[in-house]
Image (cartoon, rainbow, N blue to C red):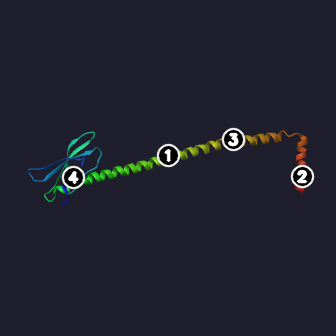
Amino acid sequence: MKNLQTILNNVEGYLISIQRNAEDGMYELEVGIPKNWVYKATKTIDYETILESDAGAIIKIFAKDNSLVIDDLIDFVDVIIETNQRIARMQEEFDEKMKKTKEELVSERLLFDEKLDEVRETSFKSIEEQLKENKRRKTVDPIEENTLEVELVDKLSN
């Protein structure tokens, strides 16, 4: 058997009372648990909600038959505590992962927006330059035009 203090340390802060039911001689535990904690009955252990509030609930935990001892009920409370603490840790890890993912997506979005702005600016600058070049070619004076033709003929003949 475990030392009673060691057993009770595991449920400290949650255990309200240990009572013995005079009718059936079995022990019952009253336990206070935070709101949104998960717990459920098993084949051998059941519970009854005594009080429910915005902060949480007080539940009575008891054995369904005489085969269980008080240690089993305390172990059950310990399972409730461990399970909900594990759920809380998992939720924190997931929230942290989501926060990092969100930051990465925001960063990617900023880079994407910068690239879009660059494309918008450079695309229209290049068309503007083409239009200027076309206009310049159209306004070339006849002497330059003949010179250009001669240069072109010379290049083709070589």
Amino acid at circle 4: Leu
Q: Marks 2 and 3: in contact by CB < 8 Å? A: no
Query: In this rendering, which labeled residue sits more in front, label 1 or label 4?
Result: 4
The amino acid pointed to by label 2 is Val
Q: Which residue is more in the foreground, 105 or 55?
A: 55
Q: What is the spatial separation of the Cα atoms under label 4 and label 2, in whole angstroms?
A: 104 Å
Is 8 on the left or on the right of 144, as rendered?
left
| Between discs 1 and 3, the one toward the N terminus | 1
- Mark toward the start of the polypeptide (2 vs 1): 1
Nearer to us of marks 3 and 2 is: 3
Tell me the residue that label 4 is attached to: 8
Mark 3 → mark 4, Cα distance in angstroms: 76 Å
| Residue where numbered disc 1 is placed | 103
* Label 4 crowd (10 A; few <14 / some 14-19 / many >=20): some
Q: Position of residue 85 (x, y in %)?
A: 32, 51
> What residue is shown at x 87% (from left), y 55% (from top)?
156
Q: Which structural element holds mark 4? A: helix
